[in-house]
Image (cartoon, grey):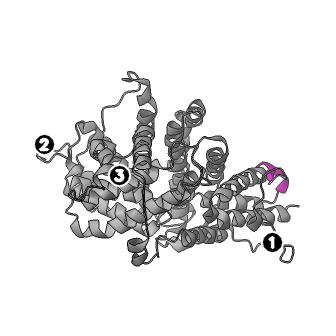
Amino acid sequence: MSSDNPSLPSLQPNSASPILVAPGNLDVGSILSEAVARIQELKGFHNTNMDVFVTEGISIPPGLARTWIHNYFTYMPAELFLSLVDRKLIEMIPDLLHMRHIKLDACMLLVYYAILYHGCFLPGKRSYGSPDKKYARQLYICCLRTIHIWQREATGTVTDFIAAIYMTRTSAECFDFDLSWEMHKLACEYAQGLQMHSLDDKHNLLTVGSANPDDDRKGMWELIQMDLFYRLIYNKPAAFSLDLAGWRVNLPWLTLDTFPDKEAAVPTMKFIVSSRLTFVLIAFFQMFDKLETGSVALEAIEPLCQEIEDLMEEWGIEDWIRSFRHDEVYTWILTDLALTGYTCIIFMLRKVTLGSDSPKSLSLDANIPQTDLARKASRQILGLIHYMLHGANLPKPEALSSILGTHRAYVAYAYLATSVIDSPTPGTMAEDMELLERVTRSVEMVALEENDFVPFARALKYVNAGAGGMHS
């Protein structure tokens, strides 16, 4: 970090304990995986005693709640199944909570608190260094406290389904991965119970409730992709119990030629690209189940990885990101799309190399296939991280939470750092080393705002010192 930047004392090297790295002993993946686990401990949500939830005093000013609700619906227009959320009721809840004769269902309260959680980060100028820092944690505690009541009452209604969907993402960004997986499984279970996998079956008489059936179709395709993503990134089994071949869900009617308005361009493009990515993942798992591990399997999977890379280039995702650099809403949508695509490349290669369902094995550098496709995808991911944390007008702590929690982007960092360490021609790795340093500086700046990220920033500095020392 340059001398004119604010210092981060806990990240400064200890003169009494210099960093010593023995060549060949630096397991980057394990180091960064342990650092992310430390973030989980500092977040503290996954092992907090229930008594704390009940007794901790939480007061959300109604005026702030209304602002966050407005922010959410203004800045998150492409949120999954947003058309099924009763916005008018959500906007009334800050006042209804103070009426003793009004009792709100736990599922609606869960949706409400999840919306407040994301709304409090928007727009991107809000800083964790402000007096509002406490609210994000308090809102998530409200979610956790409400979940236990909701799970006793849930019957699989549309609102139960939405509550599970919203908590899947919220808990992942809070590094509560076990809860995120449980919520995703519930969402898929409720979706099947609501017959959403048979939206276009002529014998299906159930209706989900959206005024526009295409919104339901779009949401279901995105939920399918989410399930495939969990299988790939988190090494989980398929949450949907039914064979996708028996589903009756058409693609929504989309066109890039006649947009109803300019606002539809980015969400429509995003859905088209995501749908193609979904088909690639379906093909991957169909192929994966029939393949043994090894070089033959890797060769069989590489064309699918190349298809994703070609997809990103064909649609010019980088150009879209640059074009909407001043629009934080579309920056969120586009960077998430790009991160998802390149992350899939890395984890497809890893999964076919490992041939294992053990998540712990994914943290070891010995299991990283050093291929050109993986290195290119890693560079793209690190470039996106630097942009999101340094160049884009996004809420930095939430952006880094999504980067590490949802996309596990520390794996991409480990890929590139390991490539630098193991390279027989260090002179050719200067640009990669510079990229690693840029990302580290960006993470350090976020750690100045949010102390939970200090362990990860420290781990990046340690890795960089080792990588740089081996080629100095």
Cα distance between the residues tagged 1 and 3: 43 Å
Q: Where is residue 317 in the image (x, y as percent from the top left)?
A: 55, 36
Amino acid on which the number 2 mark rests in the picture: Lys
On residue 202, which mark appears? 2
Q: In which quarter of the image is residue 74?
A: top left
Amino acid type assigned to the residue bearing label 1 in the image: Pro
- Residue 328: x and y in percent read 54, 38
**Amino acid at the residue labelled 3:** Ile
> In which image quadrant can residue 57 be found?
bottom left
Magenta stretch holds residue 427: yes
Q: Is residue 26 above or below residue 435?
A: below
Which residue occupies the foreground of this view, 444 or 310? 444
**Which residue is identified by label 3?**
224
From where the camera sits, is residue 340 visible?
A: yes
132 left or right, relative to 472: left
Q: Residue at x 65, y 55 (%)?
A: 446
**Residue 213 location (% of width, % of height):** 23, 38
Q: Helix or strand or loop: what does disc 3 sit on?
A: helix
- Find disc 1 in the rendering and name its residue: 23
- Sequence-first disc among 2 and 1: 1
